[in-house]
């Protein structure tokens, strides 16, 4: 898959984001070995994605920069500005820098992060898509899609989105600006993340 293919993939929008399923097909062993193999396969997919697109091609230059806010904390509500900081050690697959700095938001329980490739906006910006790379710390024994139930804080709007194949590259467009609570489910695991859409 070359840069053009990946760019086309990340430009797609709608309720379902088509991504390549990189999970192993059939594994002889279950349990720990299966989870480890699945995690390695997903890491390989992230290596290909990041290597092919690179930070510049994904619009990272359009983000605000600032001082490192230190270790990421559990998110309560939304922040209007997400500054680049060092990714957690378990989320660095695909980056050549041993301590890559990217803008990301951590989930409430810290089991998944949303790496942002540009400012999120509703309606989507014509210059930068709402690209999010989901990276999970843990994966369950049975691979599933990443299911997202998004609720607008302070409003009554609720929508659902799906990232086939589980955590990975996606474009998540939401119908209105504001602070959105995203309830995430994958591989039998759950967590919540808050994202601000301008």
Image (tube, helix red, strand yellow):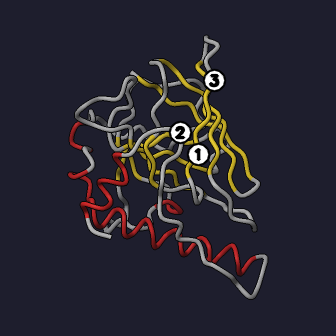
Marks 3 and 2, the one that precedes in the sequence = 2
Direction from residue 22 to residue 5 in the image, left or right: left
- Furthest residue to the bottom? 28
Say if mark 1 contacts mark 3, CB within 8 Å.
no
Direction from residue 154 to residue 189 in the image, left or right: right
**Cα–Cα span, label 3 and label 2:** 13 Å
Q: Nearer the viewer, residue 82 or 133?
A: 133
Q: Residues within 10 Å of mark 2 (few under 14, many from 20)?
A: some
Closer to viewer: mark 3 or mark 2? 2
Q: Element type at marker 1?
A: strand
Which residue is depicted at the point 48% across and 54% down?
18
Q: How far across and down, in percent of the image, does residue 184 sit? A: 65, 42
Q: How far across and down, in percent of the image, does residue 172 sit? A: 47, 38
Q: Quadrant of the N terminus?
A: bottom left
Labelled disc at residue 40: none
Say if mark 1 contacts mark 2, CB within 8 Å.
yes
User: Where 14 sits versus 167, above or below?
Assistant: above
Q: Element type at marker 3?
A: strand
Marks 1 and 2, the one that precedes in the sequence = 2
The residue tagged 3 is 158
**Cα–Cα span, label 1 and label 3:** 14 Å
Labelled disc at residue 162: 1
Q: Residues within 10 Å of mark 1 (few under 14, many from 20)?
A: many
Q: How far across and down, in percent of the image, does residue 14 sit? A: 47, 38
Q: Nearer the viewer, residue 6 or 68?
A: 6
Q: How far across and down, in percent of the image, does residue 59 sit? A: 25, 44
The residue tagged 2 is 15
Which residue is depicted at the point 29% across and 29% down?
125
């Amino acid at each position: 898959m070359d840069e053009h293919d990946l760019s086309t993939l990340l430009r797609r929008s709608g309720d379902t984001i088509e991504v390549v399923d990189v999970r192993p097909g059939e594994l002889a062993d279950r349990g720990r070995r299966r989870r480890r193999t699945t995690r390695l396969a997903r890491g390989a997919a992230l290596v290909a994605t990041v290597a092919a697109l690179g930070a510049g091609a994904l619009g990272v230059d359009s983000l605000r920069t600032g001082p490192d806010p230190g270790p990421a904390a559990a998110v309560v509500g939304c922040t209007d500005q997400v500054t680049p900081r060092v990714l957690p050690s378990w989320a660095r697959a695909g980056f050549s820098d041993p301590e890559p700095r990217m803008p990301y938001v951590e989930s409430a329980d810290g089991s998944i992060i949303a790496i942002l490739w540009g400012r999120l906006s509703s309606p989507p910006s014509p210059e930068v898509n709402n690209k999010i790379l989901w990276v999970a710390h843990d994966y369950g024994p049975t691979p599933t899609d990443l299911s997202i139930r998004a609720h607008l804080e302070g409003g009554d709007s609720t929508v659902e989105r799906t990232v086939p194949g589980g955590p990975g590259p996606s474009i998540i467009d939401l119908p209105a600006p504001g602070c959105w609570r995203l309830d995430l489910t994958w591989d039998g695991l759950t967590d919540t993340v808050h994202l601000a859409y301008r």
